[in-house]
Image (cartoon, rainbow, N blue to C red):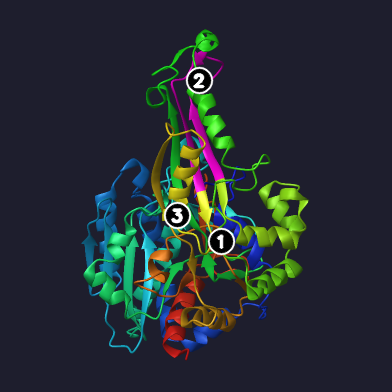
Amino acid sequence: MAESPHGLDRRDFLTAALASAGALAIGTPAWASATARYPAVRKAAEAQREAAIKRIQDWIAHPSIAAENLNMKEGAEYMATLAREAGFDSATIIPTDGHPGVFATMDNGAKRTLALYFMYDVKQFDPAEWSSPPLEARIVDKPGFGRAIVGRGAVNQKGPEATVLAALHAMRAAKVKLPVNLVLVAEGEEEIGSPHFHQVVQSPNVFAALKKAEGVFIPASWQDMNGSVAVNLGSKGVVELELIASGEKWGRGPKGDIHSSMKAMVDSPPWRLVQALNTLVTPDGNTAAIEGWFENVRPLTAREKELIAEIARNGDEATQKKLLGVSRWIDDLPYPKALERLASQPTVNIEGLVSGYTGPGGKTVLPGRAVAKLDLRLVPNQTRKEAVEKLRAHLDKKGFNDVELKVTGGYDPTETAEDSRIIRAELATYKRAGVTATLNPRLAGSWPGAVFTAPPVSLPAGHFGLGHGSGAHAPDEYYVVESTNPKVAGIVDAVMGYVDMFYQIAEVK
């Protein structure tokens, strides 16, 4: 969930790396075909265009930040109101042991039901890092793409989610009945690892409604400059945690910061933490060395390797390196092997290290406490529970019983079958729009799809949508609403993509 130093978030890189490959190339965009199929809906969407843009801007102006416990109750109520205004029959707040979720249903008397996953929380922000105030949602020019809303949550996820709602508004205005029933499940803790989302999904009414669905998708606007998209058949799981070394817990070193001259006779908690961290990975830092870490890791299947090879053959390695600001892959691997590693390897990553003084100049202190923020990316058949237990056992065996382990969020990996109705409907929708779609065996980033794909819910799940945005978690996050690129959907075309997806779910056998 952490951004890259170059402003590329997990979605930006993976979309650029995979969507451009063209494994299922199907021509150039054919936006006009959607107009021909649903002229009344298209006319309504065009008439409501400014209202749809304002809906995104207004939502951005009301941030809910789980990490800061900011406007969480208000954010859930705002989400419920948006759902009701879009035509859901009911929208209720679902309490959890953390921040609340939202559950809404729309009964259209259809034979099939589609589920939607939304999040109403956003990442923290520092206004000083933005060229445009992060809550003002100004519209600016983005070369190569068009006019875009800049603001926290613009692409992650308020822009794409509000575009789905705009599709529902347009269908209502056109007096066109949806061909599927809808179930909406939204959470307010995605940006802190969804620690209580399973409580929302497994509450009786929500669970019963989801069990009727064909599948679930999270809205996504990941078209690249060529208009391509990736269709992910799974995502890595994640555990977000902190490791804490302190003089108080250790029984050595100071309980608080003291003068650094005392290092000659006093132990250092920061060095204690560094020593513990060094045991978690191989000397190059690239492979987990936690005991038993790989014993349940499932190797790539032959089909997954086939898909990755196709991605590598059609991909642009130089562009990916340029986007990331890197010149070499781990171990100087060739591009196909680097992509295999991206999909197949569980990782131990340091998100941040915090200890002592970090301001201007120096301050000669020996800190009494040090914290490492880590994320562990998981692959099939690992689980969050297993990962946490093995990490704790490893630290204890290495003599670091005093190093605290505080889990802040996370969930298991997710997988969806290539022949599931939700994936086939996505591919059919992209094909009818003339969009190049690439099958990707596994997104290296994470989302809480496992609460849907794993028992007891057991639904196929994935990402879907047209349009473009970037900068999630980073300054100047944006979402394109007026496209000047003929291969990339603007907001009205993205609306029509969701409309067609509703019909594809109803029609695909």
- Residue contact between numbered discs 1 and 2, judged by CB atoms under 8 Å: no
- Do we see residue 82 in this rendering? no
For label 2, the residue is: 268
- Alpha carbons under labels 1 and 2: distance apart: 36 Å
- Alpha carbons under labels 2 and 3: distance apart: 31 Å
- Alpha carbons under labels 3 and 1: distance apart: 11 Å
For label 1, the residue is: 297
Q: Earlier in the sequence, mark 1 or mark 2?
A: 2
Asked whether 222 falls inside the magenta stretch, the response is: no
SS at mark 1 in the image: loop
* Dot 3 crowding, Cα within 10 Å, few <14, some 14–19, many 20+: few
- Do we see residue 66 in this rendering? yes
**Magenta span:** 349-375
- Check the image and report above or below for 327 versus 90: above
Kind of residue at disc 3: Glu
Q: Earlier in the sequence, mark 3 or mark 1?
A: 1
Q: Earlier in the sequence, mark 2 or mark 3?
A: 2
Q: Nearer the viewer, residue 372 or 52?
A: 372
In the image, taking residue 404 as reference, residue 497 lies left or right, namely: right
**x and y, in percent, of residue 480 in the image:** 53, 60
Kind of residue at disc 1: Val
SS at mark 3 in the image: helix
Q: How many marks?
A: 3
Asked whether 351 falls inside the magenta stretch, the response is: yes
In the image, taking residue 68 as reference, residue 493 lies left or right, namely: right
**x and y, in percent, of residue 438 in the image:** 63, 73
For label 3, the residue is: 386
